[in-house]
């Protein structure tokens, strides 16, 4: 009986050691898995940050292109307005010149009529 009891205690101790070893193995495996997941998450975070940075650069370039296009459009509109104003000014100058010519002709005619009246 003593030998049986001693053997039982020894077997219980062996089972306890086996349970502890299995629990330690599971804990080590879980820790390793957690470290792998942390490293993977860190890699994903780096990729997300790089993508965000690249997207930001791309958006900045898009905004700059839009500003350049808007500036080009404004420049073209200003150029067209300047051309229209120049044409309008030229038309006004022509009218003024024609008006001066008509006025000069009318004055010349009046002067001639006045001279003729003085001669008579």
Image: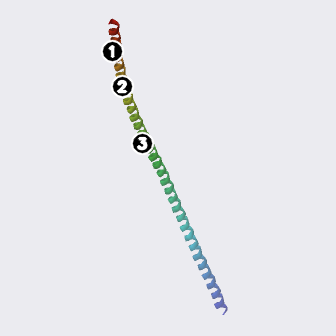
In the shown orientation, is residue 99 left or right of residue 45? left
Q: Quadrant of residue 107?
A: top left
Q: Farthest residue toward the right? A: 2
Identify the element where label 1 is drawn: helix
**Sequence-earlier tag: 2 or 1:** 2
Q: Earlier in the sequence, mark 3 or mark 2?
A: 3
Q: Is 84 above or below relative to 27?
A: above
Q: Helix or strand or loop: what does disc 2 sit on?
A: helix
Q: State the image coordinates of residue 45 (x, y, percent, origin top left).
A: 52, 58
Q: Residue at x 43, y 44 (%)?
A: 65
Asked whether 33 or 75 is in front, the reply is 75
CB within 8 Å, label 2 to label 1: no
Residue bearing the label numbered 3: 69
- Reading the image, the residue beneath label 2 is 95
Which quadrant: the C terminus? top left
**Callout 3: few (<14), some (14-19), or many (20+) C-alpha neighbours within 10 Å?**
few
Q: How many labels were placed on the picture?
A: 3
Residue position marked by numbered label 1 in the rendering: 109
- Position of residue 85 measured from the top left corner of the image (x, y, whole percent): 40, 31
Percent across and percent down for residue 13 are 63, 82
């Amino acid at each position: 009986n003593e030998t049986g009891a001693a053997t039982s205690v020894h077997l219980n101790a062996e089972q306890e050691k086996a349970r502890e070893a299995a629990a330690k193995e599971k804990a080590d495996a879980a820790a390793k898995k957690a470290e792998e997941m942390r490293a993977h998450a860190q890699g994903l975070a780096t990729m997300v940050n790089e993508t965000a940075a690249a997207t930001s650069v791309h958006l900045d370039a898009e905004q700059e292109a839009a500003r350049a296009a808007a500036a080009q459009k404004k420049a073209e509109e200003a150029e067209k307005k300047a051309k229209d104003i120049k044409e309008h000014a030229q038309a006004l100058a022509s009218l003024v010149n024609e008006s001066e010519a008509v006025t000069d002709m009318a004055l010349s005619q009046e002067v001639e009529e006045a001279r003729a009246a003085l001669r008579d």
